[in-house]
Image: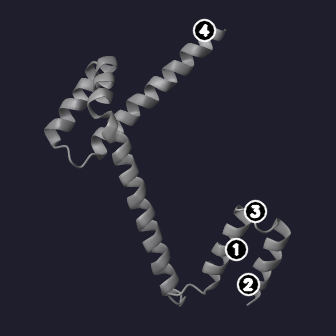
């Protein structure tokens, strides 16, 4: 039973790694089409060797590219929030209800206020 569970776990882990590598290949804007086709063929036709060679050759860049994508997504999200707040009439100084609620939630998340204090303050903000 133990060995069966271990092999199933390793099999799932292998597929996660394979999909992560293939996703990284296709999301890399610096790599041209032939490079993507070559790495994909290598990873699909010789999966074990292809994945290990890819991790050795481009593994360090995988984390850097993932971090850049996460930062870009966060920046786009922040710009969207600013645009939405501006569109609803919230001044750029951030004194609108959404900004106050965000600050209040941050205080609660960091343990500076209790859940009861959060609920009371939230009601006061929403009441106007």
Q: Residue 4 or 31: which is nearer the viewer?
A: 31
| Number of the label disc, if any, that sits on residue 3 | 4
From the viewer's perspective, is the residue at label 2 or at label 4 nearer? 2
**Label 1 vs label 3: CA separation?**
11 Å
Q: Which corner quadrant of the image does residue 97 belong to?
A: bottom right
Residue at 41% across, 58% down: 71
At which x and y percent is residue 101? 67, 76
- Packing grade of label 4 (10 A; few <14, some 14-19, many >=20) is few
- Of the numbered discs 3 and 4, the one sitting upstream in the chain is 4
- Packing grade of label 1 (10 A; few <14, some 14-19, many >=20) is some
Q: Which residue is mark 1?
A: 104
From the viewer's perspective, is the residue at label 1 or at label 2 nearer? 1
**Residue 64 in the image: above or below residue 99:** above
- Quick check: marks 4 and 1 in contact, CB under 8 Å? no
Residue lying farthest to the front in this orientation: 112
Q: Residue 26 or 103: which is nearer the viewer?
A: 103
Residue at 30% across, 27% down: 56
- Of the numbered discs 2 and 3, the one sitting upstream in the chain is 3
- Packing grade of label 3 (10 A; few <14, some 14-19, many >=20) is few
Determine the secondary structure under disc 1: helix
From the viewer's perspective, is the residue at label 4 or at label 1 nearer? 1
Residue at 51% across, 24% down: 12
| Number of the label disc, if any, that sits on residue 111 | 3
Determine the secondary structure under disc 4: helix
From the viewer's perspective, is the residue at label 2 or at label 3 nearer? 3
| Number of the label disc, if any, that sits on residue 125 | 2
């Amino acid at each position: 039973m133990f060995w069966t569970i271990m092999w199933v776990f390793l099999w799932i882990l292998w597929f996660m790694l394979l999909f992560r590598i293939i996703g990284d290949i296709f999301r890399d804007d610096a790599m041209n089409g032939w490079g993507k086709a070559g790495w994909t063929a290598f990873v699909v036709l010789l999966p074990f060797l292809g994945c290990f060679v890819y991790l050795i050759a481009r593994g360090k860049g995988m984390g850097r590219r993932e971090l850049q994508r996460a930062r870009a997504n966060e920046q786009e999200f922040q710009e969207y929030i600013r645009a939405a707040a501006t569109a609803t009439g919230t001044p750029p100084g951030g004194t609108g209800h959404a900004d106050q609620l965000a600050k209040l939630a941050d205080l609660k998340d960091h343990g500076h206020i209790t859940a009861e204090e959060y609920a009371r303050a939230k009601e006061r903000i929403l009441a106007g």
